[in-house]
Image (spheres, grey):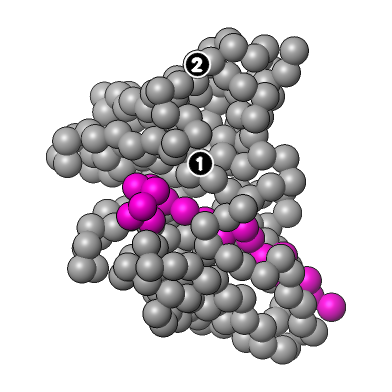
C-alpha cells in the first residue's frame, strides 16, 4: 500500500487530455513538500517528467504539466500520443516516514 | 552527457550479502547527492537509501525496510556510489536503480531525482 494514492490506470484516445491524480496527507504533500512526477516507459528506467510541482526539465514537451493543491497533486497530459503510453509515478517527501515516498503508479493506455 | 551505470546485481541466497556499484560520468559527482531506489517485479518504485554530498555532511538515510541491513557510501575520487546489502531477504528481490539527487530549497530543502541508471537486477532465492 503506497503512501501516495494514484489511480491504477487511465486511458484516452490520441489527441485527448488526461489527468492523473496523486493524493497524500498532512505529513507529505499537505505538509508543503513538493511533488515530482516520473514517466517509466515499458522496460526502461524512470525519467523525471515534472519537478517542483509544475516545472518541466529541458526536453520534456509542454503537453505535460503539473499542479498541486492542498494534500493532492495532478499530472495533465494534453494532445495524447501513442508514445505517452507508460507508467507514471508521483513522488514527495514524508515527515512521518523521514524519507521519499511514491504513489503506486498509474498505467496510461492510449486507445 | 550524464550517465549512471549500475552493476553488481545477480542471484544470491537469503542471508548473504551483495554490493552494488553506480558508476557515473558527465557530472561533477562530488557536488550531488546519490540515491538508490528499487522496483520489485511488476511493482512500483520504492526509495531505498540516500547519501548527501560531502558539502552537506555526507549524511545517509535509509528506508525502514532496509535500515541496519544496507549501507550506502560514495567514493568521490572514483565517481562511484555503492550500496552494500547484507542479510538479504527474498523480498529484496528487485531491479535496483541509482539516481542523482538535485538539491534545492522551496520553503524546505528538498531533492528531486533527475538522472537514473538503467538498473541492475538482484534476485534473492535459495
Q: Specify whether residue A17 is in view.
A: yes
* Alpha-carbon span between mark 1 and mark 2: 16 Å
Q: Is residue A82 visible?
A: no
Residues B1 and B17: in front is B17
Q: Which residue is mark 1?
A: B37
Image vertical order of residue A53 relative to residue A63, above or below? above
Q: Secondary structure at mark 2?
A: loop
Residue B15 lies in the magenta stretch: no
Q: Is residue A47 left or right of residue B34?
A: right
Compare marks 1 and 2 and give the one earlier in the sequence: 1
Where is residue A11? Give x, y as percent. 77, 77
Q: Which residue is mark 2?
A: B86
Magenta extent: A94-111
> In the picture shown, does residue B88 fall above or below A99?
above
Residue located at (54% from left, 45% from top)? B46
Residue in the foreground of this view, choosing between B90 and B81: B90
Label 1 secondary element: strand
- Give the residue displayed 57% in from the left and 55% down from the top: A2
Neighbor class of circle 1 (other Cα within 10 Å; few <14, some 14-19, many 20+) is: many
Amino acid at each position: 500500500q503506497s503512501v501516495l494514492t494514484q489511480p491504477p490506470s487511465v486511458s484516452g484516445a490520441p489527441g485527448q487530455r488526461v489527468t492523473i491524480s496523486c493524493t497524500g496527507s498532512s505529513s507529505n504533500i499537505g505538509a508543503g513538500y513538493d511533488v515530482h512526477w516520473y514517466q517509466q516507459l515499458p522496460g526502461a528506467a524512470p525519467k523525471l517528467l515534472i519537478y517542483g510541482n509544475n516545472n518541466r526539465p529541458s526536453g520534456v514537451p509542454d503537453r505535460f504539466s503539473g499542479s498541486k493543491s492542498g494534500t493532492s497533486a495532478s499530472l495533465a497530459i494534453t494532445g495524447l500520443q501513442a508514445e505517452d503510453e507508460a507508467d507514471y509515478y508521483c513522488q514527495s517527501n514524508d515527515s512521518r516516514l523521514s524519507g521519499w515516498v511514491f504513489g503506486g503508479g498509474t498505467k496510461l493506455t492510449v486507445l | 552527457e550524464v550517465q549512471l551505470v549500475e552493476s553488481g546485481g545477480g542471484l544470491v541466497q537469503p542471508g548473504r550479502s551483495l554490493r552494488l556499484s553506480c558508476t557515473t560520468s558527465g557530472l561533477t559527482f562530488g557536488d550531488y547527492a546519490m540515491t538508490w531506489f528499487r522496483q520489485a517485479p511488476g511493482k512500483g518504485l520504492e526509495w531505498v537509501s540516500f547519501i548527501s554530498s560531502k558539502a552537506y555532511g555526507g549524511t545517509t538515510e535509509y528506508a525502514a525496510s532496509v535500515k541496519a541491513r544496507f549501507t550506502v557510501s560514495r567514493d568521490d575520487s572514483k565517481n562511484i556510489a555503492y550500496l552494500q546489502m547484507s542479510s538479504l531477504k527474498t523480498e529484496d528481490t528487485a531491479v535496483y536503480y541509482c539516481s542523482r539527487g538535485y538539491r534545492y530549497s522551496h520553503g524546505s530543502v528538498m531533492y528531486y531525482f533527475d538522472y537514473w541508471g538503467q538498473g541492475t537486477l538482484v534476485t534473492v532465492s535459495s
